[in-house]
């Protein structure tokens, strides 16, 4: 009987992609950079600083995104952020903001509400202070969204999941499948709505959208079953046996560690000083890493050409984290500049040092390698035909 | 390499077993082709080889299947992954990752193959399948033939001893199909891979087969020499039909073999010509002028001028991605032209109201199931009557004519491919449109279903419908179409009577034309008629 090629632990040879020349930066570096910008943004409501962060992320995306389909997601996130902003302002106009103010811009007719609804009002005076307050708050949320969008556009989420440790591999695959599911679902909806038109039914309006639900669900289900069959017959889910006690301790370590990390993040990013949070964070991270390392023993998988983590990755991730660290530190020293007053309204100023700190986030636009395919290579074949 | 011992498979809700008492031994390094009409259990047989039947599909398998010494009873599909590579009909359903290189490596990663080995094998496979130029491309940007090659490559990297292929070329244009078959040929010859495959388009593959497994509904399965079995097979390619008509023995399986024997036949036919089909000269009912259409950044159609006449059947051919489906979609009002015009019976399709449009133009899409929503055939027919405002029962009458003996209570999903296509066609015809468009209608149809479709379409044309069908099936175009239009890169590169257009192109010529060239015969039935045999 022919023996299959057996598992060998990867030896320390170059199995990663070459760090030279155009390549994809390690997705983890992009996410760390984006998380850094986001963490910085979460400490301030100064609109000038927030807009600066948005501008920095936009510049880096423009400079370093690839030509792949997901690179277009930045625009989608921008639109989402604008929608968040708009919805919040509309709510403020109709429901008030809870911030007292004197400068009334205009007054809407107020809906009389019964006693039990005390504290809630619909309509009434709209103040400049209230609007400003919600604008600043929602701008912060919008900036966070845009940072996530930047990471999404710069690093293929599927690629990030590929870089997960072996123990999380199966969860990662589920996420990847879910990610590719959405575009397929959209294509299905379009196809089936077109078919409705061919049957002489209207393809406009809510009813037509709802009526395609069942066929779309059916075809999505069929696709998942087909994919599961393929993955099974291509060896997905082969595992090595591990002792039961080890398996249990892995689960316990990972869960407790994650819990600790969550609590610590809450402490660090919340309003308080959070001195206790740092040791908890470190302990949690250690527990999670141990769990993941041990969990990797169950998996027989090897990895094909993982992205390397070279000095460029250190610089990109470092620049993001530096922005976060500097902003958190500076916000402790000068809270006023980070949270401009809204009652009474004041023109926000751009504080010099935090602004310089944010500009550090521009570093990836210069040090990150150009992604492959952005400069046309002579060997690239012409696209044969167009997609159907 | 593959051994079936008294294998039968029965699914839980089925009255009769799908497969019964199959005994089969495929030695190492052979290409074995499974042949038979639709619904005899070809896919089930293939699924049994890698264990998906019954581990994944459910059902009960009696007997024993061993592959490379491993019993599928004891080994789940994932434990056979290093031994059996399986590629289905639709390569897109096969892909797990999103670019070529990762897809090639995916199977090896699951098997835990060392990184250095993976690296080397990916490079080897890229060369073997001619994919090196495409290594960084996203899978969704590849053409059908390229995708099918990547799908085959993705199972080859695990170095399977057995390759199982379910209709690998059905969805491909003739050129792409040849690419894929050349690769299979190379695997069998150079690497000694055992290949087990099914294919409805026998004319493409039968000459490469070392053995044929013939499955028929009413006789036991037979494994044997391709030429011998083709002599009795109910499904056979045109070249075999020609051989049978001319009484050749052993039967030729390839055009080359047939040409060597064909000198007497050519002499017998010399001086005679097939009946000339008079060109249809009615006023066009639909036309496009300088039609240009973009989807995304790329133009898919560039200045297409096409007229469709009542009573004429037009075949639209061209490679995958040439714009055939888009052209049909534009005629059916699914796409808005960027410039140029589309007129169908005085309507502008993309602006017309769907209810009015379906009386003028009906499209059966590539996946006929998209048109069917209802739970039963009867409900589907009632829906079609309602949609088109026809008298109740008109759709059911059409179904009875096109598809006699079908059960009203069946779910459209439980119909065979051919039945489903016919039901969709009946639904479209209920509105009695002047123009009928069919996208790839013979994909997945066996020869019997195809013959029925040919009869139906001929009748429709005789009734004065204009028919346009986009197809990769050169035999169908030769047999059926008055006129053939070839589309390349969104432009019409040939438009004329089928007999002239298909014969002048080596890719689109049917087998009979290749065998009898330079004589102008296209189909077996023409030759049979000329020889005075019943068709």
Image (cartoon, rainbow, N blue to C red):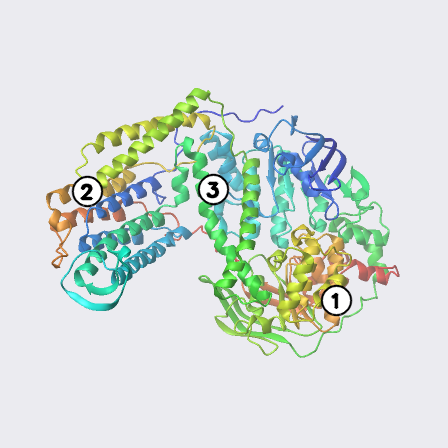
Alpha-carbon neighbours of circle 3 within 10 Å: few (<14), some, or many (≥20)? many
When the figure is inspected, residue B46 is found, relative to residue A110, above or below; the finding is above
The span from disc 2 to disc 1 (Cα, nearest Å) is 78 Å
The answer to which of marks 1 and 3 sits earlier in the sequence is 3
Disc number at residue B101? 3
Mark nearer the viewer, 3 or 2: 2
On the same chain, marks 2 and 1? The answer is: no
Q: Which residue is mark 1?
A: B458
Where is residue A293, by image quadrant? top left
State the residue in front, B285 or B14. B14
Alpha-carbon neighbours of circle 1 within 10 Å: few (<14), some, or many (≥20)? some
Disc number at residue A286? none
| Percent coordinates x, y for residue B117 in the rendering | 48, 31
| Percent coordinates x, y for residue A125 in the rendering | 20, 65
Does residue B505 appear in this view?
no
State the residue in front, B471 or B360. B360
Q: Which residue is mark 2?
A: A271
Residue at 71%, 36% (x, y): give it: B9
């Amino acid at each position: 009987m022919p023996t299959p090629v057996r598992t060998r632990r990867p030896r320390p040879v170059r199995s990663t992609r070459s760090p030279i020349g155009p390549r994809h930066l390690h997705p983890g570096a992009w996410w760390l950079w984006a998380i850094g910008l986001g963490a910085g943004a979460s400490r301030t409501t100064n609109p000038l600083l927030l807009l600066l962060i948005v501008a920095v992320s936009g510049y880096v995306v423009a400079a370093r995104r690839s030509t792949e389909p997901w690179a277009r997601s930045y625009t989608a996130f921008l639109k989402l952020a604008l929608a968040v902003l708009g919805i919040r302002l509309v709510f403020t106009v109709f429901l008030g903001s809870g911030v007292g103010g004197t400068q009334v811009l205009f007054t809407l007719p107020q809906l009389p509400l019964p006693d039990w609804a005390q504290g809630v009002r619909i309509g009434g005076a709209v103040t400049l202070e209230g609007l400003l307050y919600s604008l600043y708050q929602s701008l912060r949320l919008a900036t966070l969204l845009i940072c996530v969008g930047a990471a999404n556009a710069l690093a293929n989420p599927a690629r990030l999941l590929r870089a997960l440790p072996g123990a999380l591999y199966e969860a990662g695959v589920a996420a990847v499948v879910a990610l590719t599911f959405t575009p397929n679902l959209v294509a299905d909806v379009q196809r089936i709505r077109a078919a409705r038109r061919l049957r002489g039914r209207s393809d406009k309006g809510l009813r037509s959208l709802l009526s395609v639900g069942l066929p779309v669900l059916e075809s999505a289900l069929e696709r998942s079953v087909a994919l599961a069959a393929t993955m099974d017959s291509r060896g997905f889910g082969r595992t090595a046996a591990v002792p039961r006690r080890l398996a249990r301790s892995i689960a316990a370590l990972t869960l407790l560690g994650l819990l600790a990390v969550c609590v610590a993040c809450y402490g660090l990013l919340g309003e308080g000083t959070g001195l206790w949070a740092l040791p908890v964070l470190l302990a949690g991270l250690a527990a999670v890493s141990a769990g993941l390392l041990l969990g990797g023993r169950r998996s027989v998988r090897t990895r094909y050409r993982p992205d390397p983590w070279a000095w460029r990755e250190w610089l990109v991730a470092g620049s993001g984290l530096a922005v976060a660290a500097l902003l958190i530190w500076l916000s402790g020293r000068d809270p006023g500049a980070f949270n401009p007053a809204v009652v009474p309204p004041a023109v926000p100023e751009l504080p010099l040092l935090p602004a310089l700190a944010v500009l550090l986030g521009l570093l990836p636009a210069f040090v990150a390698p150009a992604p492959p395919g952005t400069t046309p290579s002579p060997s690239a074949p012409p696209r044969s035909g167009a997609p159907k | 390499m593959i051994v079936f011992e008294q294998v039968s498979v029965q699914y839980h809700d089925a009255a009769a077993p799908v497969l019964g008492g199959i005994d089969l031994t495929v030695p190492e390094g052979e290409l074995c082709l499974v042949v038979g009409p639709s619904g005899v259990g070809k896919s089930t047989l293939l699924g049994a080889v890698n264990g998906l039947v019954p581990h994944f599909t459910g059902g009960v398998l009696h007997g024993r299947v061993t592959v490379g010494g491993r019993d599928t009873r004891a080994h789940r599909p994932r434990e056979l992954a290093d031994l059996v590579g399986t590629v289905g009909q639709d390569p897109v359903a096969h892909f797990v990752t999103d670019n070529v290189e990762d897809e090639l490596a995916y199977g090896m990663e699951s098997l835990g193959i060392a990184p250095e080995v993976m690296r080397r094998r990916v490079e080897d496979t890229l060369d073997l399948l001619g994919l090196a130029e495409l290594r960084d491309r996203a899978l969704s940007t590849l053409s059908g033939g390229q995708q099918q090659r990547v799908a085959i490559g993705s199972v080859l990297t695990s170095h399977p001893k057995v390759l199982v292929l379910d209709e690998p070329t059905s969805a491909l244009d003739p050129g792409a199909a040849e690419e894929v078959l050349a690769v299979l040929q190379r695997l069998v010859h150079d690497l000694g891979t055992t290949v087990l495959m099914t294919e409805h388009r026998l004319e493409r593959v039968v000459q490469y087969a070392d053995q044929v497994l013939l499955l028929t509904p009413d006789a036991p399965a037979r494994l044997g020499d391709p030429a011998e079995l083709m002599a009795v097979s109910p499904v056979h390619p045109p070249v075999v039909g020609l051989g049978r008509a001319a009484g050749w023995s052993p039967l030729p399986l390839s055009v080359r073999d047939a040409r060597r024997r064909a000198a007497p036949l050519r002499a017998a036919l010399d001086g005679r010509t097939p009946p000339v089909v008079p060109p249809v000269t009615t006023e066009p009912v639909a036309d496009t002028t300088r039609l240009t259409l973009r989807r995304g950044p790329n133009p898919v159609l560039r200045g297409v001028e096409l007229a469709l006449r009542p009573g004429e059947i037009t075949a639209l051919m061209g490679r995958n991605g040439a714009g055939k489906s888009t052209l049909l979609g534009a005629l059916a009002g699914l796409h808005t032209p960027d410039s140029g015009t589309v007129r169908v019976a005085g309507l502008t399709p993309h602006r017309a109201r769907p209810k009015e449009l379906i009386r003028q133009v009906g499209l059966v899409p590539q996946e006929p199931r998209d048109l069917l929503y209802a739970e039963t055939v009867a409900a589907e027919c009632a829906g079609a009557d309602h949609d088109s405002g026809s008298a109740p029962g008109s759709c059911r009458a059409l179904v009875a004519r096109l598809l006699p003996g079908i059960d009203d209570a069946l779910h459209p999903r439980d119909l065979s491919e051919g039945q489903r296509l016919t039901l969709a066609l009946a639904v479209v015809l209920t509105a009695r449109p002047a123009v009928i468009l069919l996208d790839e209608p013979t994909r997945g149809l066996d020869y019997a279903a195809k013959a029925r479709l040919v009869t139906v379409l001929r009748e429709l044309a005789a009734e004065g419908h204009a028919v346009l069908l986009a197809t990769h099936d050169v035999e169908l175009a030769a047999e059926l179409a008055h006129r053939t239009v070839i589309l390349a890169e969104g432009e019409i590169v040939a438009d004329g009577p089928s007999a002239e257009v298909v014969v002048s192109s080596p890719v689109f010529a049917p087998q009979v034309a290749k065998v009898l060239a330079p004589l102008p015969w296209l189909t077996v039935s023409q030759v049979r008629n000329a020889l005075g045999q019943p068709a």
